[in-house]
């Protein structure tokens, strides 16, 4: 029964039938522009409501649990602070936003990488993923209605730190730079395959000491597992880094 349930984890993240995987190529990681942050909610449902309202307007929005334990919402990818401010003020006039905060790229780990180094950026990506621990997984991806699928979690952890990576696990596998498991560092991604097929179907964020965070399966929370666990060890496809 345990193997059947774990197999469902890998199958759930497979999504639509894929086109053939292109060979992995070295990544040029895109950097997110100016974003808008709003809310500081003790109640997750309030953050979900705001995120849904923003998504309904076609904005890329996600809630997250910050280091202070409060739920906040970040959205957009604007070319300038002025453009972001216009959007935020418009939403404020409509009653969608109350208080907001403009986040410029230099305030995010991606913008501080040259000064603070790769280790700092990796630690922040891992910390962001850890802040999602215990939140529920539901099939469907990054929409708040459905929660996070496996690649939605990895994409969001990078995005909140200033980087844009592809959406699906197969796209992430193709875009990252291949590394051996011996070379894994925190914030690298680890990929798994569906037991009955050879294609990539699941992804997690490596956090060190042989462990990774992932959105596991429908009805379960985002959690930590070990790469040395028999099931994951046998179905590991490979690892990629983006930094």
Image (tube, rainbow, N blue to C red):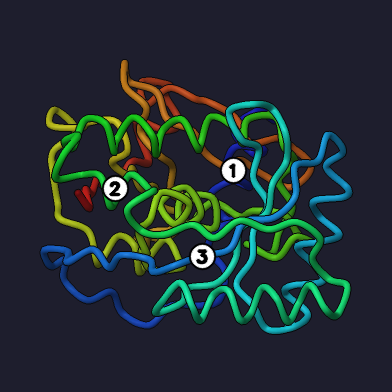
Where residue 23 sits, quadrant-wise, is bottom left
Tell us which disc is closer to us: 2 or 1. 1
Query: Is 179 displayed left or right of 142 in the figure?
Result: left
Q: Judge left or right: residue 140 versus residue 110.
A: right
Question: 82 or 23, which is in the foreground?
Answer: 82
Q: Position of residue 200 (x, y in %)?
A: 38, 59
Q: Residues within 10 Å of mark 2 (few under 14, many from 20)?
A: some
Q: Disc 1 vs disc 3: which is toward the camera?
A: 3
* Residue displayed at 75% across by 56% down: 99
Q: CA distance from mark 2 to mark 1?
A: 17 Å
> On screen, 165 above or below 106?
below
Which of labels 3 and 2 is toward the front?
Answer: 3
Q: CA distance from mark 1 to mark 3?
A: 25 Å
- Near mark 3 (Cα within 10 A), the count class, few <14, some 14-19 or many ≥20, is many
Residue occupied by mark 2: 237
Residue at (53%, 29%) from the top-left corner? 130
Task: Categorize mark 1 by other alpha carbons within 10 Å: few (<14), some (14-19), many (20+).
Answer: many
Residue ID for mark 3: 35
In this image, 170 relative to 48: left or right? left
Q: Nearer the viewer, residue 14 or 102?
A: 102
Where residue 144 appears, as percent x and y from the top left, is: 75, 60
Sequence-wise, the earlier of marks 2 and 1 is: 1
Q: Could you tell me residue 165's position as x and y percent? A: 36, 63
Residue 194: x percent and y percent?
47, 54
Q: Does residue 60 appear in the picture of this structure?
A: yes
Label count reads: 3
- From this viewpoint, is residue 12 visible? no
Q: Secondary structure at mark 3?
A: strand
Disc 3 and disc 2: Cα gap in Å? 34 Å
Callout 1–callout 3 Cβ contact below 8 Å: no
Residue that label 1 marks: 215
Q: Secondary structure at mark 1?
A: strand
């Amino acid at each position: 029964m345990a193997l059947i349930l774990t197999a469902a984890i890998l199958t759930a993240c497979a999504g639509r039938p894929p086109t053939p995987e292109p060979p992995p190529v070295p990544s040029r990681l895109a950097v997110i522009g100016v974003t808008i942050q709003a809310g500081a909610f003790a109640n997750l449902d309030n953050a979900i409501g705001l995120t849904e309202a923003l998504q309904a307007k076609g904005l890329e929005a996600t809630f997250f649990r910050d280091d202070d334990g409060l739920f906040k919402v970040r959205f957009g990818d604007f070319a300038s602070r002025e453009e972001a401010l216009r959007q935020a003020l418009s939403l404020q006039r409509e009653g969608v936003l109350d208080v907001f905060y403009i986040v410029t790229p230099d305030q995010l780990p991606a913008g501080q990488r040259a000064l603070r180094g790769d280790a700092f950026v990796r630690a922040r990506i891992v910390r962001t993923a850890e802040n999602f621990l215990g939140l529920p997984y539901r099939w469907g991806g990054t929409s708040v209605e459905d929660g996070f699928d496996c690649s939605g979690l990895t994409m969001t952890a990078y995005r909140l730190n200033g980087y844009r990576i592809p959406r699906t696990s197969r796209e992430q596998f193709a875009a990252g730079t291949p590394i051996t498991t011996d070379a894994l560092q925190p914030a690298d991604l680890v990929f798994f395959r569906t037991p009955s097929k050879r294609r990539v179907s699941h992804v997690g964020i490596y956090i060190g000491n042989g462990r990774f965070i992932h959105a596991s399966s429908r009805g379960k929370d985002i959690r930590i597992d070990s790469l040395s666990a028999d099931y994951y060890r046998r179905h590991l496809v490979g690892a990629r880094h983006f930094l």
